[in-house]
Amino acid sequence: MLAISKPSFFRARKVSPPSLAVASPRLQIKNITSSISVKTHASTEKKEIAMWEALREAVDEEMERDPTVCVMGEDVGHYGGSYKVTYGLYKKYGEMRVLDTPICENGFMGLGVGAAMTGLRPIVEGMNMGFLLLAFNQISNNCGMLHFTSGGQFKVPVVIRGPGGVGRQLGAEHSQRLESYFQSIPGVQIVACSTVENSKALLKAAIRSDNPVIFFEHVLLYNLKGTRGDASTTNCLEKAELVRQGTDVSIFTYSRMRHVVMQAVGTLVQRGYNPEVVDLISLKPFDLDTVSSSVRRTRKVLIVEECMRTGGIGASLSALISETLFDELDSPVVRLSSQDVPTAYAAALESATIVQSEDIVGAVEKLVGKAPGAAMNGKDSDVPVKKAKKTKAAKTVKKK
């Protein structure tokens, strides 16, 4: 009878301690001192890395921490992933934990769900989130529902991640925004990262979660630079981020649109406006506590998204705000979304279909009206300083 050994991902990797060379006491003290100074310098200076590197670190650290974590998808092994998120992990962990799959999304998605049911924590990468429409049955009917339909006998701790959003001239099929497609599936969480720091912390939290998590990464943010937390840092998957506190209007956004909004904020502040910016991060469920406190503070809402206008994330959030915070609003909720058309390949037409910073500036000016801070800046005040002087002089002449 043949003895069959368990796959390598059932066993923790053994790391042998580094060999210590024997040296004189004086040399040892010198080496210790120099190493302390190097560590101190490294801890005070945070190195900036790209988002794809932060995501790769998250996967690597979690695979090293937990031997049940594994990766599967197209070109994730030898090639290192389309955007290098799994670069080098195949050599480090082997083919049983970093599995190259055929071009068959419904097949390897079903494999990932089954692996999660039997005790593993798979990370399933979609080369493009648009391709995962082929696996919609597995995500909806299996991934999201098995915990409930089994009466709690199974849990499905799987992370489904990959690039999405409008890139640069990638054409309609590679420019899909599918957040709202998956938002309607009961039983799954949806997270959209937007910075280097939150991308790593959120992905680590998603891998550790016992719930199925769909993790959206924007194709144009992979080369975004920034600092990240250490190996122990994780973020709450259901918490929004208050990016900028303000008083005039609450701008709710997520993913790449966070950066487009902040670009518009720079212009708005110069014109005397004080907008508040909230990065939703959790697209399902919404962080209603953060949303509510922001709405009560400003009483005006602008939702900015790259998703489609019809049935998009903004539509769901707008309905939620109108239903639960209607008495807190001074005006109707305004939405800026992508046009309901297939994304064009031509650069000019592609830009015309999605929200630009000038669209946000115009929407805020229309929603808020005259800038509340304009008088303080000497701009757009009701009675300009020069005109006030002329009026005073005219009154003096009249008395004489």
Image (cartoon, rainbow, N blue to C red):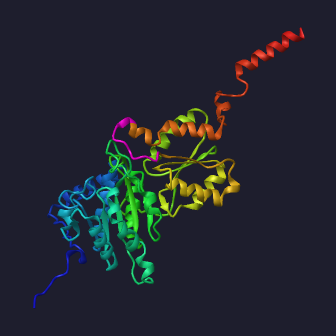
Dividing the picture into quadrants, the one containing residue 248 is: top right
Tell me: residue 260, above or below residue 183: above
Front position in the image: 135 or 280:
135
- Tell me if 336 is positioned left or right of 97 in this view: right
Measuring from the top left, give residue 91's x and y in whole percent. Answer: 17, 63
Choose between 228 and 63: the one closer to the eye: 63
> In which quadrant of the rendered image does the N terminus lie?
bottom left
- Magenta span has 51? no
Instruction: Please identify the residue farthest to the bottom as the structure is shown.
Output: 1
**Residue drawn where x is 41% and y is 39% of the image:** 351
- Check the image and name the residue furthest to the left: 1
Q: Residue at x 17, y 59 (%)?
A: 78
For the view shown, which residue lies furthest in the front direction? 341
Q: With respect to residue 358, does 282 lie above or below?
A: below
Looking at the figure, which quarter contains the C terminus? top right
Instruction: Tell me, yes or no, whether the highlighted magenta stretch contains residue 342.
Output: yes
